Image (cartoon, rainbow, N blue to C red):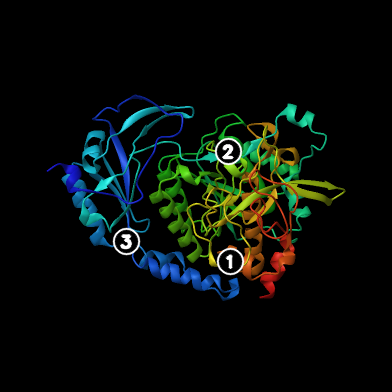
Amino acid sequence: MSSSMQKIPLAGSERSLLSGSSLIGSPEPNEQIEVTVLVRRMSSQEITDRVEQNSRQFPSNRRHLTREEFSSKYGCSTEDLAKIEAFAHKHNLKVVKKNALHCTVVLSGTVDSFCKAFDIKLALYRHPEGTYRGRTGPVHIPPELSQIVQGVFGLDNRPQTRPHFRRLKEKESKKSSSHVSYEPNELATLYDFPRGLDGSGQSVAIIELGGGYSTADLQAYFEKLGIGMPKVLAVSVDNARNNPTGSPDGPDGEVMLDIEVAGSVAPRANIIVYFAPNTDIGFLDAINTAIHDTANKPSVISISWGSDESSWTTQAQNAFNQVFQNASALGITVCAAAGDNGSSDGVSDGHAHVDFPASSPYVLGCGGTRLNSSHGKIVNEVVWNDLPFGGATGGGISDVFDPPVWQSGANVPPSSNPGGHKGRGVPDVAGDADPITGYDVLVDGKNSVIGGTSAVAPLYAGLVAIINQGLGHQVGYLNPLLYTKVPSSIFTDIIDGNNGSYKAGKGWDACTGLGRIDGTKLFNALKAN
């Protein structure tokens, strides 16, 4: 009997090749690689129940788990870990690391051993973004592990995401008569973020999957703004490090934008930057590291990397969604950019797509606008759309996640795709993202103007940090509050523009969500309750 008959496909593990990939050969059979096995979590239903119960409460009445409580009760069982270890030994694989809190087992071995262990074939492919080791079809596991193993990551090491920022080119600024740029703290004033709060006592986690920052640049930037530089700490995940490339157009532009925006809004907060490889497991490990960081204890996470839902495996989306739910149980707010390629999210199949992780119901999806102001007052704000030559805010209807209960009253329309699927609507909120009205930042020694929904996620992460400071406790899972608990007057509805397949209009729309938040009104609404 062949090994493929003895094993069964792991649900949700199916992979397709990246579009534009070409086969260039096979990896060396004796090449050593590492693979992560995700194991089921104990009492996961209790986590779901707690988050649902908290979602019906204002923050002051929520009972968030402490990191210590979570660690003691909601890891994975030693019996499950032992079964994975036995499987590894049977297939000449070594257990490098076991993490009961993250529910992961890291295995090492040869390419040949892993191919035999999981009944797969690995090959090398060339792609416009570089070469990668890939596979097609599902991973196979023994039937007795089918309820234990939730995912197998690292066999395929393709780049999983892209940063959602857009640097304004000089020729673009000259062509646009409406070009204006803002310092992030200037935007915080225009958006009426609470005054007298600076993020003291809070930590903002920023997830980065490439690039790095220069301390000298940060010092110069915040000195120019006339505000104190926040404490910035780099945390290495899976051997990735703060590693500036020297180009503002590369991932450094993302890293510096995120730090400078969040740090301008909450200059007394600690900014913790988690650097990880740009793979699905690197990304997942970074988020897990942030939410379970007992030393830095971030209360809000900003994510400006993502990709269309169709480019993810189901096992990865399920794993991320579980981790975001865990963050909600811990009282950690997660903000994510909704994408910069309009309603297609950069996919050329003629259909609408939304960006993940912004489409997770446990994440605050952040869309983009174009903001015009005069003499410290907002003149108008419309949907960001510079297509076909530039970018546009992402947004639409999820193909993966069902409509959340808290979004049931928002009149989310069906998908524009054939069949009119009903799903989670993206984004939830919006803010300035058009490079034409972008953010003044300093990257690799160069003054730049950068936009993209990448800027909106750290902007709102900074707002959450100062609100947490003002309330004296963590807001946590923000989405149910915005849709069902706070008055609609905290939002400025964005009713003009489109992102391709979807038009803005009164109420929630798939371009800017509920609209732009008035920070002080949100703070006062939460404080009153």
Q: Which image quarter: residue 125?
A: top left
Estimate the spatial distance between the alpha carbons at disc 3 and disc 1, rounded to whole Å.
34 Å
Q: Is residue 199 visible?
A: no
Estimate the spatial distance between the alpha carbons at disc 2 and disc 1, rounded to whole Å.
41 Å
In percent of the image, x 46 and y 59: which residue is there?
294
Question: Label 1, on which residue?
Answer: 408
Query: SS of the residue at dot 3?
Result: loop
Tag 3: amino acid:
Cys
Categorize mark 2 by other alpha carbons within 10 Å: few (<14), some (14-19), many (20+): many
Categorize mark 3 by other alpha carbons within 10 Å: few (<14), some (14-19), many (20+): many
Expressed as whole percent of the image width and height from the top left, the position of residue 258 reads: 61, 45
Residue lying farthest to the top in this orientation: 24
Dot 2 or dot 3, earlier in sequence: 3
Name the side, left or right, on which 357 lies relative to 453.
Answer: left
For residue 213, the mark is 2
In percent of the image, x 48 and y 58: which residue is there?
324
Residue lying farthest to the right in this orientation: 375
Tag 2: amino acid:
Tyr
Decide: is 121 above or below 107: above
Q: In the rendered image, which quarter contains the C terminus?
A: bottom right
Please report contact status of discs 2 and 1: CB closer than 8 Å, yes or no: no
Residue lying farthest to the front in this orientation: 419
Expressed as whole percent of the image width and height from the top left, the position of residue 384 reads: 70, 44
Query: SS of the residue at dot 2?
Result: loop
Name the side, left or right, on which 267 lies relative to 22.
Answer: right
Expressed as whole percent of the image width and height from the top left, the position of residue 417 reads: 55, 48
For residue 352, the mark is none
Camera-near label (2 vs 3) is 3
For residue 76, the mark is 3
